[in-house]
Structures are given as C-alpha cells and as structure tokens.
Amino acid sequence: MELYLNATSPYARLVRIVLLEKGLMDTVTLKWCDPWADDAELLKANPAGRIPALVTEEGTTLSESMLIAVYLDSVSLNPPMLPAASLGDVLHLAGLGQNLMDAAFTTVIARKHYGNEIDESELGQRRARAIQRLLNQLSSELGEKQQGSTINLGKIATAIALDYLAFRLPEVNWKEEYPKLQAWHVGVTARASFQETAFA
C-alpha cells in the first residue's frame, strides 16, 4: 500500500495512528508530498489533490481519512477501531472529533489565504463559535471513566483535533479552559502512536 501525506495534516495523522495501532505500518510506503503544490503523483492517485490518499494492494485509491480508517480496520482485526459493542458511542465521538478538526483546519486555511482578518467575517465567527461549542460538549462528555487502555477511532479523531488546535490555534487555549478535557487528552496521547506522529 502507499499513503500520500504530509507532516502537518491532522487527517493524514489520523491514518498514520490507525496504521500504527493496527500493526500495519510495515505494509505501507509513505509518500510525503505537498498537496498545495499540485504534486503530480498525488494528483494521479487523487484528482482532488487532497491528503491523505491511500492506494491499496489492489491499486484502488481511497480518500477521506475516516473512510481510509474504516478500510484499514477491516484489513487487520485487532484491535478494532470500531468495536461492535460500542459502535454508536465510538462513531458519536469520532463525529465530534471530525467536526472540531474541520472547524480548526478551515480556520487555518482561511487565514493562510485571506489573512487573520477573515476571522471577523460571518463565516469566521461561525467557525469560532462551533469550536467553542464542540469543546464544551467534549468537556462535558469526556472524563477519566472514558479513558481506559483501549483505543478507538473516536478517541483518535478527538485527541488529534485537540492537538491540532494547540498546534495551529494556540490562542484558543483549551488546555487551561477545560482541565477535564486536558486530563483526558493527556491519557490518550501518551500512547506511542501519538508520540511518534506528533505535530512538529
């Protein structure tokens, strides 16, 4: 398999962590690229020019991090990223994490192309409110009882989204404002897969 990615994409990081947790890293060749440069190889694999993109052993290209994660979960059974016994809860948390990731990422990209003043636009304000609502909900739902030693797609998506906020939007300062969420985050990101893929 081949995985097109870069080091700062939260979506690519999600796939890398799933690969590590599933013990599939040795089956994948990492193809580092710049999606903003219209990398020719990436465009051949994914005409949208977006990462991550995974080319399977059969030559099928998969895009969108969550869909890639579902595929990888089917390739290797243990540990399950989408455990049947708690599927609804895991998908609920994965959705919150994905939404937080999207709101943060689109804020960063908007600033990159239009400057920080874009934050004052109606769309910028809407994204900022969404981030705060998501942080509030995650803080109210997550705690020590949800930590445990097992990992799943919901925990991965949410912890990456929080990491990405700290990395790209430090002014949000969620670690001080949401101590319960910070304690949960520390427990999840202590795993080797998170340490190995940390944003730099």
Image (cartoon, rainbow, N blue to C red):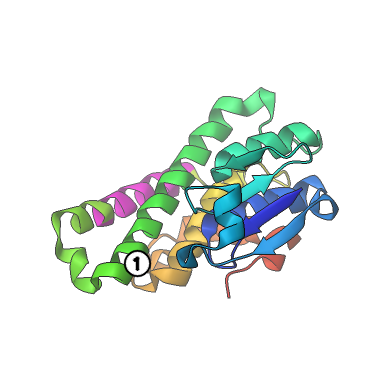
Which residue is disc 1 drawn over?
A: 172
Residue depicted at x 48% and y 59%:
162
Is 159 on the left or on the right of 60, as rendered?
Answer: left
Please tell me whether the stretch drawn in magenta is mainly helix, strand or loop: helix
Q: Position of residue 5 (x, y in %)?
A: 61, 59
Tell me the quarter of the picture where residue 66 sits: top right
Res 170 visible: yes
Q: Position of residue 179 (x, y in %)?
A: 46, 61
Q: Is residue 48 above or below residue 118?
A: above
Nearer to me, 3 or 72: 3
Res 154 visible: no
Task: Give the residue type that dot 1 points to.
Answer: Val
Q: Position of residue 75 (x, y in %)?
A: 78, 35
Q: Quadrant of the C terminus?
A: bottom right
Looking at the image, the residue that sits furthest to the right is: 26
Magenta-highlighted residues: 128-141
Is 98 on the left or on the right of 26, as rendered?
Answer: left
Is 25 on the left or on the right of 16, as rendered?
Answer: right
Q: Decide whether residue 139 is among the magenta residues.
A: yes
Residue depicted at x 44% and y 53%:
101
Q: Is residue 40 above or below residue 24?
A: below
Tell me the quarter of the picture where residue 125 sits: bottom left
SS state under label 1: helix
Q: Position of residue 139 (x, y in %)?
A: 43, 50
Q: Decide whether residue 22 is among the magenta residues.
A: no
Residue depicted at x 59% and y 46%:
155
Q: What is the crowding at mark 1: few (fewer than 14 residues within 10 Å), some, or many (at least 20)?
A: some
